[in-house]
């Protein structure tokens, strides 16, 4: 059989296709990328035999993936067949973290975990056990099944504040729902504004559709970011502002739109809560005012406003990055107000899109054992894991210390803020931690028991694409090596040992869970999905563009959000109380000074933006990704470096009240003076002293509903000790 398949996909360019002679042995299996990326690509995987894969390709038949995937997943064979994969359950045999292990059978390891959980519960009550998970896999069954065990056992809850909270809250405040124009419509836009997302690196398919608009319609691409990243290099207009100042930019743009009669007054009258009050409010938010806050020249603000004001079909693709600031929810809401002022929502190819998370509606109640969820059980904030594990009474919400954990799909010792506290917590002798992992991560290294996990091609699961509209099946395509077991297996086996396996929701296979969710949603079942590969659940034009009104009771878009309202999609439960400084949130979009403003002792602002070849802490184990990223670096403006006596390649020390770490300087003029960027996440062990970038980030809950402000840090920078003796990074 001869077929054309995408051979290699250059993330920012088009896929290169080749005619491949697929001889009898090369089978193509269909799957979905499981990683925590809004693109959730539909994949065509070369299956070499029962347990080996070749190249991974983006599906050309999927209208969002459109044949393009990132380079790191294209070479997934490097990860799944990696010699360092965990293959055996292991029990700690030395002191915590000193790397001494003995192998154990699955039976013995699971017995030990169950026994320690029961012992902890007997001593301090069920809430002393904290099952901890996040989005290492986005498969619903393997990711969320841990909640079934949690609820059945009344173990402590986890409030997932790492990533989406600030962004989702900010977006939903205006529209009332977390959905938006079909992201494929970007290809039909006359202007695509890529705001606070480094899409070339973090969700490459945004570029596919944006670049199609440019090629086919001459559309302009605008990028708003804090540095001249890979995405900005593709832009017609790049706006480099200071971190945490997007609210000021958005307000000045809207000031100009009203000033120059580029606002759609009919639309405002019909669709918004308070157009006159808002216009009055904006009167003082001039481009000059915003220029002083953002660092952007007035002319650039004017040019941007004119472009979006005169281009009705402008698509605002709002990312997560700019919401990772202590005023991030306000800034997200402010940006989403711009297409409301221009009326762009009305047009195909116009409006604002952040996430489609509200459209999928797959019923996870059985999977997660929600019927057992006891509202009296406490919630612990994922971002505050350092405080939780070091006994901070407020973080523990008045409950017992955490003395037992099961960790799946997350690497908090590397990814969580306040890393020094996190490490200190994991080193506690009275904490029992079981980490279920694919590799010996920074977190696994500090565990008492490490269990080896399967990878996505080795188990069944189902995925939803937050950045698009497909539900995609990821069936088991190959056998795992001897040893690793799925998350589902571990949860079911622990349930048996902990006496809850008879409760409803347990005892089902992965397929049965998938069947149940699909059938309830009217999307067929596992078998039909295997045939069709995915389902497109994009709502119709009227719904996606809020043509019949926004999703608030009065149908109006809110310029005046109710920051204490109940509509936030990821709002923490009442029992957690208020999160962050509510009272400081403004009535209308504005610049709010909630951020860590630079001061004399901390003259720089640090953003910890994602690296292109890593995905959070994942892919740091593959040589190709590590080779591309080279070493942990600090990008700083040459003039700032000059003043500090730092040359390119020098070791620099960077710190704040939370700690200090060493990086290597990379001089870079695509950033405002006083702003520094550290792309990551590198494993802690790749840094000198074994301390990673999250030593510098804070875990204070950002307003209004919590969330970690990973890109909002005030820091000092100085030439490192022995600056020119460039020491090699420690081996992983
Ligand atoms: N290669 C790669 N891909 C990834 C990830 C990764 O680590 N690496 N992570 C995955 C995950 S979990 C997620 S949630 C998504 C996130 O993907 P994105 O939505 O792209 O969000 P971030 O990656 O946090 O940041 C995006 C950009 O925001 C910029 N930024 C920081 N502060 C500000 C600000 O105040 N204003 C503005 N305008 N820009 C700012 C950063 O410099 C960065 O370039 O990506 C996913 N995809
Ligand atoms: N400084 C800084 N810190 C950040 C960020 C930042 O931009 N800057 N980004 C933040 C964001 S947006 C996020 S979402 C978090 C992400 O934080 P995490 O969710 O912790 O990060 P990942 O690296 O995506 O996944 C963690 C682990 O899941 C494992 N895993 C994958 N699949 C499976 C599976 O099927 N079973 C099991 N048992 N394990 C599996 C992987 O091997 C990996 O080690 O990090 C946050 N931390
Ligand atoms: S990491 Fe993102 S861009 Fe890469 S294959 Fe997965 S979903 Fe697609
Ligand atoms: Mo994330």
Image: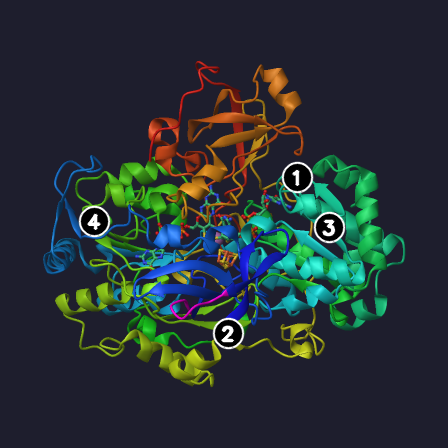
Please name the residue that numbered disc 2 is placed on.
Answer: 360
The residue under the point 66% across, 62% down is 209
The residue under the point 56% across, 55% down is 9
State the residue lying farthest toward the right: 260
Q: Distance between the residues labelled 1 and 3?
A: 12 Å
Q: Do the residues labelled 3 and 2 touch (CB within 8 Å)?
A: no
Mark 4, secondary structure of its residue: loop
The residue under the point 48% across, 62% down is 570
Horizontally, is 224 left or right of 104 in the view?
A: right
* Foreground: disc 2 or disc 1: 1
Please name the residue that numbered disc 3 is placed on.
Answer: 222
* Foreground: disc 4 or disc 1: 1
Local crowd size for mark 3, using a 10 Å CA cut-off: few (<14), some (14–19), many (≥20): many
Q: Distance between the residues labelled 2 and 1?
A: 34 Å
Q: How far apart are marks 3 and 4 (CA)?
A: 49 Å
* Foreground: disc 3 or disc 2: 3
- Viewer-closest of 561 and 112: 112
Q: Is residue 22 magenta?
A: yes
Mark 3, secondary structure of its residue: strand
Mark 2, secondary structure of its residue: loop
Local crowd size for mark 1, using a 10 Å CA cut-off: few (<14), some (14–19), many (≥20): many
Q: How far apart are marks 4 and 1 (CA)?
A: 45 Å
- Label 1 near ligand 1 (CB < 8 Å): no
Local crowd size for mark 2, using a 10 Å CA cut-off: few (<14), some (14–19), many (≥20): some
Please name the residue that numbered disc 4 is placed on.
Answer: 403
- Viewer-closest of 708 and 36: 36
Q: Position of residue 503 (x, y in %)?
A: 21, 77
Identify the mark at residue 228; answer none if there is no mark. 1
Magenta stretch: give its range.
Answer: 21-27
Q: Distance between the residues labelled 3 and 2?
A: 29 Å
Mark 1, secondary structure of its residue: loop
């Amino acid at each position: 059989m001869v077929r054309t398949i995408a051979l290699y996909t250059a993330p920012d360019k088009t896929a290169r296709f080749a005619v491949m002679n697929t001889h009898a042995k090369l089978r193509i299996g269909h799957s979905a990328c499981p990683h925590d990326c809004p693109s959730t690509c539909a994949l065509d995987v070369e299956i070499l035999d029962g347990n080996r894969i070749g190249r991974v390709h983006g599906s050309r038949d999927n209208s969002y993936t459109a044949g393009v995937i990132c380079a790191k997943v294209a070479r997934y064979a490097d990860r799944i067949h990696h010699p360092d994969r965990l293959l055996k359950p292991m029990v700690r045999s030395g002191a915590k973290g000193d790397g001494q292990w003995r192998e154990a059978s699955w039976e013995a390891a699971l017995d030990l975990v169950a026994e320690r959980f029961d012992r902890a519960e007997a001593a301090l009550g069920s809430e002393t056990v904290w099952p901890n998970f996040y989005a290492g896999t986005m498969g619903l069954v393997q990711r969320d099944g841990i909640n079934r065990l949690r609820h059945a056992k009344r173990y402590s809850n986890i409030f997932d504040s790492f990533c989406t909270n600030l962004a989702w809250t900010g977006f939903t405040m205006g529209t009332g729902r977390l959905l938006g124009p079909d992201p494929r419509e970007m290809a039909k836009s006359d202007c695509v504004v890529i705001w606070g997302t480094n899409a070339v690196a973090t969700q490459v398919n945004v570029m596919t559709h944006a670049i199609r608009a440019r090629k086919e319609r001459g559309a302009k691409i605008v990028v708003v970011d804090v540095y001249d990243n890979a995405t900005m290099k593709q832009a017609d207009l790049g706006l480099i502002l200071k971190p945490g100042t997007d609210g000021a930019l958005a307000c000045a743009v809207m000031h100009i739109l009203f000033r120059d009669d580029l606002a759609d007054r009919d639309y405002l009258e019909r669709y918004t809560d308070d157009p006159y009050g808002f216009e009055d409010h904006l009167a003082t938010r001039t481009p000059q005012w915003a220029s002083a806050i953002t660092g952007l020249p007035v002319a650039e603000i004017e040019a941007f406003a004119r472009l979006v004001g005169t281009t009705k079909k402008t698509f605002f693709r709002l990312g997560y990055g700019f919401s990772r600031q202590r005023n991030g929810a306000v800034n997200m809401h402010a940006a989403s107000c711009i297409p409301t002022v221009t009326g762009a929502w009305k047009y195909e190819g116009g409006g604002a899109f952040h996430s489609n998370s509200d459209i999928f509606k797959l019923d996870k109640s059985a999977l997660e054992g929600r019927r057992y969820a006891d509202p009296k059980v406490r919630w612990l904030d994922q971002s505050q894991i350092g405080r939780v594990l070091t006994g901070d009474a407020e973080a523990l919400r008045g409950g017992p210390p955490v003395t037992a954990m099961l960790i799946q799909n997350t690497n908090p010792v590397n990814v969580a803020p306040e890393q020094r506290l996190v490490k200190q917590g994991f080193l506690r002798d009275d904490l029992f931690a079981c980490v279920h992992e694919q590799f010996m991560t920074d977190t696994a290294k500090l565990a008492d028991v490490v269990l080896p996990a399967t990878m996505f091609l080795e188990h069944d699961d189902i995925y939803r694409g937050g950045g698009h509209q497909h539900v995609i099946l990821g069936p088991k395509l190959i056998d795992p090596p001897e040893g690793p077991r799925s998350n589902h297996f571990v949860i079911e086996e622990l349930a048996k040992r902990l006496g809850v396996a008879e409760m409803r929701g347990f005892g089902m296979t992965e397929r049965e869970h998938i069947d149940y969710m699909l059938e309830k949603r009217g999307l067929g079942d596992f078998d039909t999905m295997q045939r069709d590969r995915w389902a497109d659940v994009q709502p119709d034009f009227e719904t996606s563009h809020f043509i019949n009104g926004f999703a608030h009771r009065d149908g109006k878009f809110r310029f005046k959000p109710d920051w204490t309202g109940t509509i936030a999609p990821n709002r923490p439960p009442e029992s957690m109380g208020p999160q962050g400084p509510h009272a400081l949130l403004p009535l209308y979009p504005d610049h709010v000074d909630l951020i860590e403003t630079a001061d004399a002792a901390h003259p720089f602002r640090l953003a910890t933006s994602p690296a292109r070849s890593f995905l959070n802490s994942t892919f740091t184990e593959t040589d190709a990704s590590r080779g591309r990223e080279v070493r942990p670096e600090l990008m700083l403006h040459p003039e700032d470096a000059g003043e500090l006596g730092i040359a390119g390649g020098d070791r620099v020390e960077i710190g704040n009240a939370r700690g200090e770490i060493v990086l290597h300087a990379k001089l870079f003029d695509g950033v405002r003076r006083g702003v520094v960027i550290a792309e990551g996440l590198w494993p802690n062990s790749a840094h000198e002293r074994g301390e990673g970038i999250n030593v510098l980030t804070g875990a204070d809950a950002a307003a209004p509903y919590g969330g970690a402000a990973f890109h909002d840090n005030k820091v000092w920078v100085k030439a490192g000790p022995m600056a020119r003796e460039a020491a090699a990074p420690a081996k992983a």
